[in-house]
Image (spheres, rainbow, N blue to C red):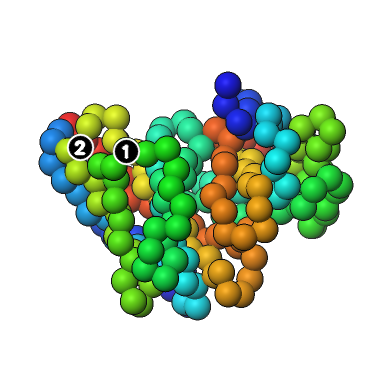
Amino acid sequence: DAGVTQSPTHLIKTRGQQVTLRCSPKSGHDTVSWYQQALGQGPQFIFQYYEEEERQRGNFPDRFSGHQFPNYSSELNVNALLLGDSALYLCASSSRTSGSVYEQYFGPGTRLTVT
Amino acid sequence: QKEVEQDPGPLSVPEGAIVSLNCTYSNSAFQYFMWYRQYSRKGPELLMYTYSSGNKEDGRFTAQVDKSSKYISLFIRDSQPSDSATYLCAMNRYSSASKIIFGSGTRLSIRP
């Protein structure tokens, strides 16, 4: 079992650009959540996808958008990048149909640097 | 005021010591409480979870929740250098897959 995978590992972008991050959930999981973790801080919830729809959203602007595909993988898109978007972006997968909410398995993250 | 407060440390203790990590929270609606461990350049790993008030033990780890005081703790007995990591407390309100609110993390170092 590969667990949660994320790509790319690292990314450097310029202010104003757009970025797409990708996540493949753990086998058997149908729900993907995205978190932003700034340096020295805990992860902050961005949004969650289930059945290809955004189900919950945290306090993030519309520049942050996502998508979930039929195979449960997911993308996080950030438009008009700001310096403050520099962070580790974490994907977590879980199952709504089996298991419990606590069992959110995190990927290794994508470290985004905006210059 | 943040919903979840956690002392960032760093906390340094000798090998074999008992470690106590704590968080306070303000939202009385939280019912599910978790502790995650995060090694450098890795994603968080779930260590313990507890529903409502009480204690839960798993090997060298004990989680305590006191809802009346809005205070949660994680104790690590016989600490090992491999326990050196950042520990994140986390909580959420519902039994469904609702968003998890994390503390800022405490950086722990175990000295051999």
Q: Nearer the viewer, residue A38 or B9?
A: A38
The quadrant in which residue B69 appears is top right
The answer to whether residue A5 is seen in the rendering is no
> Disc 1 or disc 2, which is closer to the eye?
1
Where is mark 1, residue-wise? Answer: A61
- Tell me which residue sits at (61%, 55%) in the image: B46
Q: Quadrant of the C terminus of chain B?
A: top right
Horizontal relation, residue A109 to residue B94: left or right: left
Distance between the alpha carbons at the discs numbered 1 and 2 = 12 Å
**Residue type at tag 2:** Leu
Residue A99 drawn at (x, y percent): 63, 71
Residue A42 on image: x %, y %: 51, 37
Residue B110 seen = yes
Q: Is residue A108 left or right of residue B84?
A: left
The residue closer to the viewer here, B76 or B88, is: B88
Q: Are marks 1 and 2 on the same chain?
A: yes
Q: Secondary structure at mark 2?
A: loop
> Mark 1 belongs to which amino acid?
Pro
Q: Which residue is mark 2?
A: A81
Q: Nearer the viewer, residue A26 or B67?
A: B67
Is residue A55 placed above or below A70 in the rendered structure? above
Question: Dot 1 falls on which chain?
Answer: A
Q: Residues within 10 Å of mark 2 (few under 14, many from 20)?
A: many
**Rendered view: A75 above or below A37:** below
SS at mark 1? loop
Q: How many marks?
A: 2
The disc label shown at residue B78, or none: none
Left of B35 or right of it: where is A73?
left
Cβ atoms at labels 1 and 2 below 8 Å apart: no
Image quadrant occupied by the N terminus of chain B: top right
